[in-house]
Amino acid sequence: MHEPDSKFMLRNCLRKHKNDSAENLYDLLVVEGKIAELAPAGALTPPREAAVYDAGGRQLFPSFIDAHVHLRDPGFEYKEDMQSGLCAAVHGGFGAVMAMANTNPVNDKGAVTGFIREKAARICPRGPRVYPVGALSVGLMGEELAPMGELAEAGAVAISNDGRPVQNNELFRRAVEYAASFGLKVIDHCEDADIAHNWQINEGGGSLHTGLKGQPSVGEAVQVARDILFAEYLNLPIHLAHISCRQSTDLIRWAKVRGVPVTAETCPHYLLLDDAKLHSYNTNFKVSPPLRTSADVAALVQAVQDGTIDILVTDHAPHAAYEKDTPFDESPRGFIGLETAVPLTSALFSAELLEELWCKKPAEIFKLPRNNFAPGDPADFFLFDLETPWVVNRDNIHSKSLNSPWLGQTMQGKIVAHWLGGTQIFSCEDSLCLPKPL
């Protein structure tokens, strides 16, 4: 990490700006950690004593927000710890992450929320920022509501029972009402736990081929329908986590036409991978919800493009190698995603839509600060080089864990430098990817 320049200019950045019909080159001026001006290339004169860098036509993005991350800290630091998780985040283009509550101890008390925030600020004082998500129920057991006022006061930005779906409808209803009284949204893992208990894979051709117990997609859709009905009845917002199937997108689209206050997320893997990947029994493809069919993949891509799905998240879920190197039915669900998310989704969507999905909409939904490149905004941004390939392996991944479905594969596009608050947190200087001082 470099010491911040009080004034610097980044020249020749590629991006759309305001009413542009196409991407053009722009110059960015940063003063005292804030955006001072973004203008067409050549239109700005650098202030005296300002450092000047050449972005070389690389894509300029505001720092992204990942609204669904498992940092595993406290309690599971052998999988990931605060330092490794935030290092992975910043190298993946993320200036802020929302940390889920399935830690040990569970984040169901203000003291745990405060510990997470304090540790993140101490280890990475310049960022990325960590926004804890508090537990919906005590111990994530789904039996007693967690003290949401205490969690909100300590800095929680949302409430979730994370990977343990709330089956008790009365408890869930009261949670939505209770959270709303403190300005918090409930993030719901939509799964009917009674349908295909102890599932391993999506129910269908993949489960028939492998002999593994399947989970029908309707198990997700049933819970999505419940949440939509509650959101409409209570007129309170509910956010639907990691949507994975066509039936869910159909229900969400219907709800939005009716004006129901629901928002939804999905992950890069549900837009790119289907359950045929599980035919090899590779545990790096085991995730919750499970990978669905190719028809579900196509429906999700369409749902993102038409706005049915509001945001993208990684659901970054690190596990130790020995945990994944087990028989399929014993392996934990989930895989890492912070460092592959931008290259993967840049191949699917325009730069303008990526900014909406990874920055603008998450900030709006969860009331988080963001950089819009307006004067006075925090100078949180990164450069993305679409022409730089890299391989997903130990040399290039900063997460403590390496459980990725793309392990050994080549990514097209790399974050080559990242600034937070005007401070350059990292760059690819050694590989000559860093914008060099002129």
Image (cartoon, rainbow, N blue to C red):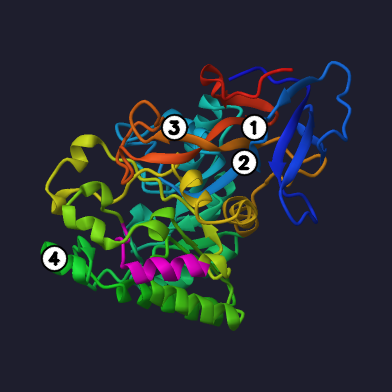
- Residue at coordinates 37% horizontally, 43% vertically from top-left? 336
Q: Position of residue 185 (x, y in %)?
A: 55, 61
Residue position for label 1: 420
Residue drawn at x 14%, y 54% as measured from the top left: 329
Quadrant location of the N terminus in the rendered image: top right
Q: CA distance from mark 1 to mark 3?
A: 17 Å
Q: Nearer the viewer, residue 261 or 214?
A: 214
Identity, as a three-letter code, of the amino acid under mark 2: Ser
Q: What residue did someone put label 3 on? A: 82
Classify residue 277 by image quadrant.
bottom left
Q: Amino acid at mark 1?
A: Leu
Magenta residues, dominant SS class: helix
The reply to whether callout 2 and callout 1 are in contact (CB within 8 Å) is: yes
- What residue sits right under mark 2 in the picture? 63
Q: First in sequence: mark 1 or mark 3?
A: 3
Q: Are marks 1 and 3 in contact (CB under 8 Å)?
A: no
Label 3 SS: helix
Q: Amino acid at mark 4?
A: His
**Start and end of the magenta stretch?**
288-303
Categorize mark 2 by other alpha carbons within 10 Å: few (<14), some (14-19), many (20+). Answer: many
The residues tagged by marks 3 and 4 sit, at their Cα atoms, a distance apart of 40 Å
